[in-house]
Amino acid sequence: MTEQNFSSMRTAMVESQLRTSDVDDPRVIAVMARVPREDFVPADRRAMAYIDRPIPLGAGRALNPPLVTGRLLKEAQVEAGDKVLLIGAATGYAAALLTALGAAVTAVEEDGLGEIAATGVSLVRGPLNAGAPAGAPYDLLFIDGAVEEVPAAIVQQLADGARVVTGIVDKGVTRLCSGRVADGLVGLNRLTDIEMVVLPGFSAPKAFTF
């Protein structure tokens, strides 16, 4: 597939997936129209780079659909110079977009998933639910997937007033959420139901039942 094909597919993604689904931040539109998503998928799946479905990466993981990334970026309200903690770097697509928006990104990814393609990113290998405390405090927590809960260990790495964007798994449904940190706690607003990948290691404690 030629670069012209990918360019056309990228334009179609912007027009048919993003603009029609409430991704209306011109900065987000601009970086997603410019960054070549095909560079962030496995070589044998490059033709799938712009489909509106998760792309399998192996090891039980997948790359979020473009719409999910666009909605997270819109809600994140990234500002130049923001210190961002990105949980679930995967192949580095979200990291590349955040960097293009002017953020300083610390990306956390587990061992064994492969290298990330983004440059200018501080990569931390380890459990996703541990975050990256060495770089704290962060202005923005960007969880690139859905979790059952945001662990206190990660919330403690965020500055007071920090923004949070994530997906939350609620009774088997994944929901896009955003919020802020105040007094060491994070409050999330549920925005919309959306299909997104579920990240491992974020199960909420099970309530005791009789």
Image (cartoon, rainbow, N blue to C red):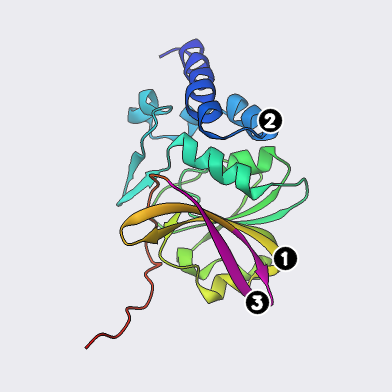
**Rendered view: 128 above or below 8:** below
Is disc 2 surrounded by few (<14), some (14 to 19) or many (20+) residues within 10 Å? few
Q: Give the range drawn in magenta.
A: 179-193
Is disc 3 surrounded by few (<14), some (14 to 19) or many (20+) residues within 10 Å? some
Q: Which residue is drawn at 38% across and 34% down?
A: 42
Q: Residue at x 64, y 31 (%)?
A: 31
Label 1, on which residue?
161
- Look at the numbered disc 2 and give the secondary structure of its residue: helix
Label 2, on which residue?
26
Q: Nearer the viewer, residue 76 or 194?
A: 194
Q: Disc 1 residue type?
A: Gly
Spot occupied by residue 124 in the image (x, y as percentages of width and height): 55, 60
Q: Disc 3 residue type?
A: Gly
Residue furthest right as drawn: 81
Spot occupied by residue 114 in the image (x, y as percentages of width and height): 42, 47
- Look at the numbered disc 3 and give the secondary structure of its residue: loop
CA distance separating discs 3 and 2: 32 Å
**Can residue 27 be seen at all in this image of the molecule?**
yes
Of label 3 and label 2, which has the lower sequence position? 2
Look at the magenta stretch and give its main secondary structure.
strand
From the viewer's perspective, is 156 left or right of 58?
right
Of label 1 and label 2, which has the lower sequence position? 2
Instruction: Give the quadrant of residue 19.
Output: top right
Spot occupied by residue 181 in the image (x, y as percentages of width and height): 66, 68
Residue 184's tag is 3
Q: Nearer the viewer, residue 64 or 166?
A: 166
